[in-house]
Image: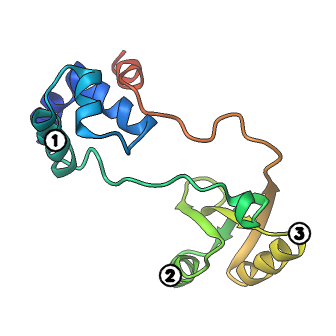
Amino acid sequence: MALEIEKLLDPIGWKLLHALQENARLSYSELGQRVGLTSPAVAERIRKMEDAGIISGYHAEINRAKLGFALTAFIRMQVHAGERYSRFATFAKDIPEVLECYRITGSDAMILKVMAASMEHLETLIERISVYGMLTTSLVLSASVTRRNITRMAQQAEES
């Protein structure tokens, strides 16, 4: 499988990935013009990247503030091991304000990225979550990097 992925990630494959990360709605024809392939060749390459798990989905980027969720916060959480962790992980999947939830190393067991409409909304969310462990909450003031495209340079830096 690694050899297949290497073959897919040749310079043209990386150009396709870059173009799709910039705009996943580009047609095969537009992608082909950018990378020097025909539409059918682009479609086949993309299908192979999807089959190999390199491309795992296509998503719309949503402006949460426009939907009324102006606050973003990170909640670090100390959770007791075992059943309590499992119960919280299941619980977190059912909380619509939880955008991301990761199990991490260090003194905290989990980190959550959450959205809220107001400070009161965030406070209510914190109260709901706090029954599962000790929390430390940080409000996002601004973001200097919100979504980074994965490039071949990142792979080459790792190989150095």
User: Which amino acid, mark 1?
Assistant: Ala
Q: From the viewer's perspective, is 82 left or right of 25?
A: right
Q: Is residue 12 above or below residue 53?
A: above
Q: Left or right: 133 with respect to 101? A: right
Among the two numbered marks 2 and 1 on one chain, the one whose residue lies closer to the N terminus: 1
Q: CA distance from mark 3 to mark 2?
A: 25 Å
Residue 74 visible from this viewpoint: no
Q: Which residue is mark 2?
A: 90
Residue at the extreme right of the image, as rendered: 120
Indicate whether 68 appears above or below 58: below
Q: Residue at x 17, y 29 (%)?
A: 6
Which residue is under mark 3? 119
Q: Secondary structure at mark 3?
A: helix
Element class at badge 1: helix
Q: Earlier in the sequence, mark 3 or mark 2?
A: 2
Amino acid under disc 3: Met
Q: Residue at x 51, y 84 (%)?
A: 83
Residue at label 1?
43
Mark 2 lies on a secondary structure that is: helix
